[in-house]
Amino acid sequence: MTAPHEAASAGQALALALGLGRDRLGDLDDPMRDARLLLAHAAGCERGALSRLEVEDFTPEVMTVYLALIDQRAAGRPVSKILGYRDFWNHRFAVTEDVLDPRPDTETLVEAALAQPFERVLDLGTGSGCILLSLLAERPRTVGLGTDISEAALNVARQNAGALGVLARADFAISDWFAAVAGRFDLIVSNPPYIALAEIPGLAREVRMHDPRMALTDEGDGLAAYRAITAQAGHYLRPRGRILLEIGPTQGPEVAQLLSDAGFDGVEILPDLDSRDRVVGGVWPI
């Protein structure tokens, strides 16, 4: 078989390289997309620049790196954890095995948060910081606090805050929900662990094996975090302050009831782009 660096044209070299990756990735959801991302990483360019590569760019060294990345993906490691980043909202966030992989569904929460003004925001269980930092980047006059029980996760969030130029407006603290939080906020956001223990075996391998378990499940019914957060959130919100919580698609009614029982007004369930329940929000009364 012709090697990419021996191809007659750049187009043929690209097709050969991508074909090798696709074949090794087998029955993954979108092997060609993953092959393009990993080839671009190995070649040191963005995915959109692959068509501008020349035959001589497909060196044996580049192909060795590329196929090693492909093998990692074939073994179930997420592309984001291989590349070390995930694009989310309007920015690129560093990710490691210490943080939950940011996913497009969570952008529903960011969009809802930005629909109204706020000056001070609290992100409980911030992980990579993708929610908090996306909000701070969009609102240059705001400040925020991100908490997590993992120092390793907070280190990733700090790195991302520096890369986005918002570190001066972002504080981070080790905290079990509100344990180390002081003061009041206009907005509380959280994407807590909401997967029930019984659902863990059914998760995709790349989620089950490469996202931190404590960011996925409460080792119970998936509602423990919501009980803890809704019970205390009113003490940390200014009058008419909002809370927005990401949920699993079947948890809307239960989490909405928790907010109502805790005294929140205007409780609503918001859908994601696939029309699945994704965010529950409420307003703290005056």
Image (cartoon, helix red, strand yellow):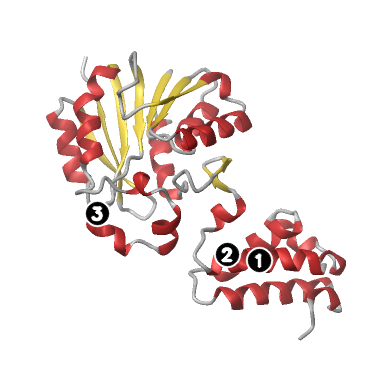
The residue to which callout 2 is attached is 72
Q: Residue at x 23, y 52 (%)?
A: 250
Which class describes the residues within 10 Å of circle 1: few (<14), some (14-19), or many (20+)? some
Q: Residue at x 87, y 67 (%)?
A: 56
Whole-angstrom CA distance, mark 1 to mark 2, is 6 Å
Q: Does residue 254 show up?
A: yes
Report helix, strand or loop for mark 3: helix
Report helix, strand or loop for mark 2: helix
Whole-angstrom CA distance, mark 3 to mark 1, is 34 Å
For the residues labelled 1 and 2, say whether their Cβ atoms are less than 8 Å apart: yes
Residue 279: quadrant of the picture: top left
Q: Residue at x 52, y 17 (%)?
A: 141
Q: Nearer the viewer, residue 5 or 69?
A: 69
Position of 44 compared to 168: left or right?
right
The residue to which callout 1 is attached is 68
Residue kind at label 2, given as amino acid type? Gln
Which class describes the residues within 10 Å of circle 3: few (<14), some (14-19), or many (20+)? some
Q: Residue at x 79, y 75 (%)?
A: 4
Q: Position of residue 92 (x, y in %)?
A: 59, 42
Q: Does residue 129 show up?
A: no
Of the numbered discs in the image, which one, if any, rests on residue 197? Answer: 3
Position of 109 compared to 40: left or right?
left
Residue kind at label 1, given as amino acid type? Ala
Position of 54 compared to 207: left or right?
right
Q: Position of residue 116 (x, y in %)?
A: 39, 26
Residue kind at label 3, given as amino acid type? Leu
Q: For the N terminus, which image quadrant?
A: bottom right
Q: For the C terminus, which image quadrant?
A: top left
Marks 2 and 3, the one that precedes in the sequence: 2
Which class describes the residues within 10 Å of circle 2: few (<14), some (14-19), or many (20+)? some
For the residues labelled 2 and 3, say whether their Cβ atoms are less than 8 Å apart: no
